[in-house]
Amino acid sequence: MQQLRKYSYCKANIVLAVIQVAVFGMCLIVGDTPYILGQCGTNLVVGARQYWRLVTSVFLHAGPSHLGSNLLLQILMGNAVERNIGAPRYVILYLLSGIGGNILSVAYDCATGVNTYSVGASGAVFGVMGALIILIVKGRKKLRSGTSLLMRALFAVFFAVYSGFQNPYTDNAAHIGGLLTGLVLGLLLTSGMSGDDVDLRDLR
């Protein structure tokens, strides 16, 4: 019963994950059309003013490993975040972090004079990671392992960003943009919460 109650607070995160799996399955069936219509690229967003791509690209993935790694992190971190801020705010956090990551990615391409195409929920996932860091900072004093948990979270962020820079195909600007968006939204969405309100029982 306790396990069922725990996951009943994480419906939005599960629904978002199911949508991504469904979209990936659709792409396997229909081919490249969803990527052509939904991927993010500077010439498409800025040049053609197809701003919807800032959102649609969040739900597209380049392959099974890309999808799997994002979903694993999303489930591990997102459930804790959603349980603390609620489903509506979690969806806002997720989508705006994905958009924020794509905006920085497009801005970086504009500044460097290149045009790349990107897909994936990594920006949104990094945003969830940023919000989780804010929650850990708020609630660390009531946890005996609060400081250790914070250090592990910061190390995870550092390692994820560092790993991204080792892969030339990784959209690091989207990761950083999503993380920064998540940190800011984490502060805003938890502004009325005290340390005693934070529930991080899954992360202890």
Image (cartoon, rainbow, N blue to C red):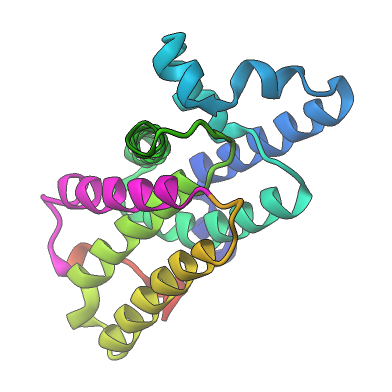
Q: Quadrant of the N terminus?
A: bottom right
- Estimate the x, y position of residue 122 in percent, counting from the top left: 51, 48
Q: Does residue 172 belong to the magenta stretch?
A: yes
Name of the residue lying farthest toward the right: 29
- Residue 90 visible in the snapshot: yes
Q: Residue at x 16, y 45 (%)?
A: 188
- Estimate the x, y position of residue 164 in percent, counting from the top left: 52, 62
- Estimate the x, y position of residue 58 in percent, counting from the top left: 53, 34
Q: Is residue 3 above or below residue 63?
A: below
Q: Residue at x 36, y 39 (%)?
A: 108
Q: Number of callouts in the render?
A: 0
Of 180 and 169, which appears nearest the observer?
169
Q: Is residue 18 above or below residue 132?
A: above
Q: Residue at x 32, y 66 (%)?
A: 199
Q: Residue at x 40, y 68 (%)?
A: 157
Left or right placement of residue 85 versus residue 201 in this view = left
Of 142 and 117, which appears nearest the observer?
117
Q: Quadrant of the C terminus?
A: bottom left
Q: Main secondary structure of the magenta part?
A: helix
Quarter holding residue 145: bottom left
- Residue 9 visible in the snapshot: no
Quarter holding residue 69: bottom right
- Estimate the x, y position of residue 53 in percent, counting from the top left: 50, 21
Q: Does residue 192 belong to the magenta stretch?
A: yes
Q: Which residues are magenta?
A: 171-195
Q: Is residue 144 above or below residue 112?
A: below
